[in-house]
Amino acid sequence: MAAYDPNNIFGKILRGEMPSLKVFEDDAAFAFMDIMPRADGHTLVIPKAPCRNLLDIKPADLSALMPRVQHVGQAVFKAMKADGLTLQQFNEQAGGQVVFHLHFHLLPRWAGVQLRPPGQMADRALLEQQAEKIRAALA
Ligand code: AMP
C-alpha cells in the first residue's frame, strides 16, 4: 500500500489550505459537510492523525476517532430529523476510496428515500443551512 500523502484534499482542509463547511473539531477529529452529498446532511469525519484509511491508522488513533464518529453521528441524526443513519468507509481505490485520508461518511436516512448517485455538487446555501443545524445539535 502507498504511504500517506499529506497533499490530499482532506489533509489540505485540516491545515486550513482549502475551505470546508466545518461542523466539529477537537484534538483528534474534524468533521465537515460532503460537497457532493448522497443524502441531505451527508457529513464526513476524519482523524487529525495522518493515515490513508482503516488499513494504516494506528489503533490508538482509531480508538480516539470512533467516539467522535458516534458523537457527530448522533448530532447529524438529530439535526436532520432522520429515521436512520448509514455509516460508510472505503479503503484503497479497489475498495471505492477516492480521497486518501481516512474518512467516515455519515449519511442520514429516511424511510423510502434512496441515496443519490455520487458526484452531484450541492447548493452551497443549502449545505450551509444543514451545517448550521448540525452545529446547533452539537452545541
Ligand atoms: P471516498 O474517498 O470514495 O469515500 O469519497 C470521497 C468523498 O469526499 C466524496 O463523497 C466526495 O463528495 C467528498 N469530497 C471530495 N472533495 C471534497 C471537499 N473538498 N469537501 C468536502 N467533501 C469532498
Image: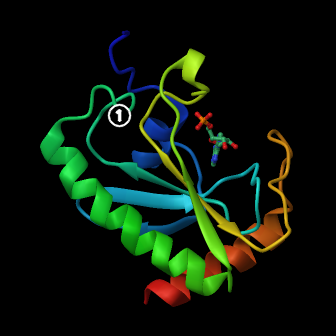
Q: Is residue 19 above or below residue 98?
A: below
Q: Position of residue 55 (x, y in %)?
A: 32, 26
Judge whether residue 28 can be spotted in this image: no
Residue at the outermost left position: 60
- Mark 1 lies on residue: 54
Percent coordinates x, y for residue 137 in the rendering? 51, 88
Badge 1 density bin: few <14, some 14–19, many ≥20, Cα 10 Å:
some
Q: Please tell me in which quarter of the rendered image ligand 1 is found.
A: top right
Quadrant, the N terminus? top left
Q: Is mark 1 within 8 Å of ligand 1?
A: no
> In the image, is 17 to the left or to the right of 94?
left
Q: Is residue 103 left or right of residue 67?
A: right
Q: Residue furthest top?
A: 1
Horizontal side of residue 17 vs 25, given as left or right: right
Q: Position of residue 126 (x, y in %)?
A: 81, 72
Quarter residue 78 falls in: bottom right
Amino acid type for the residue under numbered disc 1: Leu
Against 128, is 132 above or below?
Answer: below
Residue 104 position within the rendered picture, expressed as x and y whole percent measured from the top left: 48, 49
**What residue is at 82 percent from the left and 39 percent from the top?**
119
